[in-house]
């Protein structure tokens, strides 16, 4: 290499390193606020479940777990992808055209209200049938009916969080997480102590209302600050966007959420019923602990990647994708090691009966690596609006694998069979996602080489 070429190479290396450092510094405050909110949200869920498990015992805790899982499943389907669709397009259009950004915000807000009301009505209507039929557990009918109203607020909370992410109002997300997390812990635990599973369901409802109120105030303040109008975009005019991005996003939870709920229903109908479900639910709690750092990064990265494409062009976009992937791998590895070491101790907090769940816990924790990496790669699919490809090529194979493996293994192995199905599905998702985005990631090196040769 000649001296001028060596100097140019060194300069390019310094510029690349400087760009990465600037990106990291720019993301740091957003990550800090998101981490604060997530710690309180996820931490309150974990602490609440530990408290309720000790108050109610293994079997009754299993009943509350299936009530909570049913509400989460309903919210997942009813949200129809509006939350991350709002994040995706606000992150882009608030830089390109703030007027259109405001109109899209109002349109998505109205759509979320419609979905939220419909979800609450449907779950309340069919609560008894779900308890008596699909679950063969009439005892959860009344708690499920109470918790059905929580779906209205939780669907709305998904939209509000997505809107605040798109507006880069991460401070409000953090503060909202602190308030709602503390409220959730206090209300669900107090409800369980006073009135068992039904009381915990009431606590779930009240805490979701509290979170909705906090996020609504935050969204209105940020909207005024960024001078986004209240006029709504025309639904017919935005139909291409909805068909291209929102519709496949809506179909994704219709595939995924029933599958994850069905696995838990398999456990309820297995020989050990709610006891096996309780073990699996605790494993999912610990998996959530492992996943929260990369999940926290995901919301911030989605905004950063879309903004980079608009502001910094193709090179900046690809740099952001690679930075996100590397940071995700580092986060999930550290998080997995910490939770794996503390796992037996945490299981003991739930009560002596839960210490038999090590095998299921291990399988679920292993799933964190392929799940977090596939989520990071999936950001590229979202930015390029390849949602239909993702639905058919990633989500369907993943969900089919999860439910098929669980169907065969749960009757004999219980929670271990359910965890094996989850791990298998996440491995399939990682492989298919990596295949679908391989060219986009691979092209970074040739592009950098071309720039350096100029």
Image: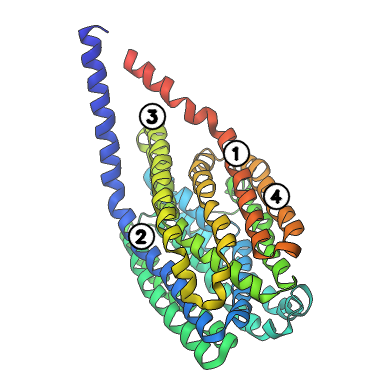
| Badge count | 4
Residue at the spot 65% in from the left edge and 64% down from the top edge: 415
Q: Is residue 153 left or right of residue 256?
A: left
Label 3 to label 1, Cα distance in Å? Answer: 25 Å
Q: Secondary structure at mark 1?
A: helix
Q: Is residue 24 left or right of residue 322?
A: left
Q: Which residue is mark 4?
A: 401
Label 2 to label 1, Cα distance in Å? Answer: 28 Å
Going from N to C along the chain, the mark reached first, 3 or 1, is 3
Residue at the spot 39% in from the left edge and 32% down from the top edge: 313
Going from N to C along the chain, the mark reached first, 1 or 4, is 4
Q: Which residue is mark 1?
A: 431
Task: Find residue 418 and name its label.
Answer: none
The quadrant where residue 216 appears: bottom left
Q: Are marks 4 and 2 in contact (CB under 8 Å)?
A: no
Which percent across, then down, holds residue 53? 53, 80
Q: Which residue is mark 3?
A: 315
Label 2 to label 3, Cα distance in Å? Answer: 28 Å
């Amino acid at each position: 290499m000649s001296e001028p070429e060596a100097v140019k190479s060194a300069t390019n290396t310094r510029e690349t390193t400087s760009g990465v450092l600037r990106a990291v510094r720019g993301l740091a405050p957003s990550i800090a606020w998101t981490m604060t909110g997530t710690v309180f949200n996820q931490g309150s869920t974990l602490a609440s479940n530990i408290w309720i498990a000790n108050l109610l015992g293994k079997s009754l805790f299993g009943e509350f777990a299936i009530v909570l899982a049913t509400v989460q499943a309903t919210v997942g389907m009813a949200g129809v992808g509006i939350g991350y669709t709002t994040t995706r397009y606000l992150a882009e259009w608030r830089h390109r055209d703030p007027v259109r950004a405001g109109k899209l915000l109002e349109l998505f807000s109205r759509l979320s209200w419609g979905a939220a009301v419909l979800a609450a009505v449907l779950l309340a209507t069919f609560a008894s049938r779900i308890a008596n039929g699909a679950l063969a557990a009439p005892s959860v009918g009344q708690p499920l009916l109470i918790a059905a109203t929580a779906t209205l607020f939780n669907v709305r909370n998904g939209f509000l969080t997505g809107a605040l992410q798109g507006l880069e109002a991460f401070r409000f997300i953090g503060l909202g997480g602190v308030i709602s997390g503390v409220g959730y812990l206090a209300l669900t635990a107090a409800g369980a102590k006073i009135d068992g599973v039904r009381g915990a369901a009431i606590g779930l409802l009240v805490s979701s209302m509290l979170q909705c109120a906090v996020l609504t105030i935050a969204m209105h303040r940020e909207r005024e600050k960024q001078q986004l109008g209240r006029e709504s975009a025309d639904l017919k005019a935005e139909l291409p966007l909805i068909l291209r991005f929102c519709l496949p996003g809506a179909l994704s939870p219709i595939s995924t959420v029933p599958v994850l709920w069905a696995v838990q229903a398999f456990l309820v109908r297995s020989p050990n019923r709610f006891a096996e479900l309780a073990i699996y639910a605790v494993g999912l709690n610990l998996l959530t602990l492992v996943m929260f750092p990369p999940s926290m990064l995901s919301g911030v990265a989605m905004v950063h990647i879309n903004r980079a494409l608009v502001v910094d062009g193709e090179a900046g976009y690809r740099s952001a994708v690679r930075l996100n992937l590397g940071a995700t791998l580092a986060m999930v590895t550290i998080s997995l090691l910490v939770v794996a070491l503390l796992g037996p101790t945490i299981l003991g907090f739930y009560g002596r009966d839960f210490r038999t769940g090590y095998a299921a816990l291990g399988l679920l924790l292993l799933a964190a690596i392929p799940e977090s990496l596939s989520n990071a790669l999936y950001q590229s699919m979202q930015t390029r609006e390849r949602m239909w490809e993702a639905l058919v090529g990633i989500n369907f194979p993943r969900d089919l694998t999860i439910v098929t493996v669980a169907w065969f293994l749960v009757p004999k192995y219980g929670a271990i069979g359910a965890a094996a199905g989850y791990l298998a599905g996440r491995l399939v998702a990682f492989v298919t996602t990596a295949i679908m985005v391989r060219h986009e990631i691979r092209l970074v090196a040739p592009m950098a080489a071309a720039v350096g040769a100029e």
